Amino acid sequence: MMSQSPLKIRGLRVRAVTVPMSEPHRTASGTITESPLVLTDVITDQDIVGHSYVFCYSALALKPTALLIAGLEPLIAGRDVAPLEIQQLLGKRFRLLGPQGLAGIAMAAIDMAVWDALARACGLPLVRLLGGEPKPIPAYGATGYDGAQGSARVAGAWAERGIKGVKAKIGYPDVGEDIAVVRAMRQAVGDGVALMVDYNQSLSPIDAIERGRRLDDEGLAWIEEPTLAHDYAGHARVAAALHTPIQCGENWWGAQDMRTAIDAQASDYMMPDVMKIGGVSGWLQAAALGATHGIRLSNHLFIEVSTHLLCATPTAHWLEYAEWFNPIIEQPLRIVEGCAVLDERPGSGVEWNEEAVGRYLVE
């Protein structure tokens, strides 16, 4: 438990790792074979350490991101472990550069690790520090851009594990192929499993409307990112034209992007990415917007901290469950009867498997 004196930041430990995928994950824009991650430890004067990781998407961004995060140490060393204050401090420092891209990722890495340190110091799971309580969050798994047969195989495997939903990457040359994927998956999982599809921003608004109308009769839970993530007007046109809900949000930077999307009526559901939305602090702003406007929120990746945040989100919807980063996590998130389940361990659930970290370390 935290002592009477304020917990202060002593320094940072930043490491870059490349974690291989157990199976390559194909999308409409390319195939992911490995996960380039930056691991951040916030070390305090009471030897309590907070952890976070961020996903760099491309190996080209791995070392620059690690260097940028490490370069923030002089700005926060000696300061109280006060996440909202540190968020404002770093936000001011990067105001002219902007909160997007590597700067946004670096700020989120610090934010998540500071919140983790504070929760550990208080002896509480992050969700309880935020005023919520652990509760089961329904989880869905994903299949890549794998065609009808491959998508059905993966969907069936998820259903056998008791998962409550499956999402497929689509955007094939012809909408008939998109429909064939959905129907093959439905046959594989039956009627009790929700199906979602993700176009990964691959369509124009007109094409999205045309394809979406063909998909409207397939009983989908949502159609995700049919057009460019920041084409709010385009997404609004698509959302207004279709019966199937539209899902967006994983590529918005900060709560301001989410507010712009809400003002444009660009999406029926929203799925912030905790790294891009601004860490835990940014998610709290997004959750307040979701609650104010009655919009159901899901997550994108970062399953450990995202489960805590969804448990503290009034309009929580689905947990996007992926096992990509599990090899470096000491105690991976548990899925019980298709739901993510937290325990009472202090912190955000991020703890390193140091043997694996050493194996995947990038010098």
Image (cartoon, rainbow, N blue to C red):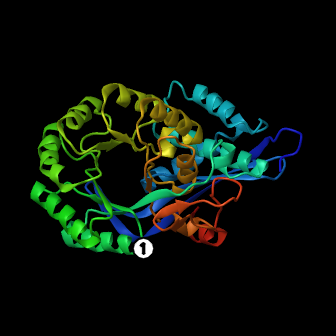
Q: Residue furthest right?
A: 4
Q: Residue furthest front?
A: 192
Between 112 and 194, the one lying in front of the other is 194
Quadrant containing the C terminus is bottom right
Observer able to see residue 103: no
Between 48 and 120, the one lying in front of the other is 120
Circle 1 Cα neighbour tier, 10 Å, few/some/many (<14 / 14–19 / ≥20): few
Residue plotted at (30% across, 63% down):
144
Q: Position of residue 54 (x, y in %)?
A: 53, 51
Between 61 and 313, the one lying in front of the other is 313
Between 319 and 106, the one lying in front of the other is 319
Query: Of helix, strand and loop, which one carries label 1?
Result: loop
Q: How many marks?
A: 1
The answer to which image quadrant residue 90 occupies is top right
Q: Position of residue 346 (x, y in %)?
A: 71, 55
Q: Amino acid at mark 1?
A: Arg
Residue plotted at (67% across, 33% down):
86
Observer able to see residue 186: yes
Is 249 located above or below residue 173 in the figure? Answer: above
Asked if residue 34 lies left or right of residue 202, the reply is right
Pointer 1: what residue?
Answer: 161
Asked if residue 113 lies left or right of residue 246, the reply is right
Residue plotted at (26% across, 62% down):
145
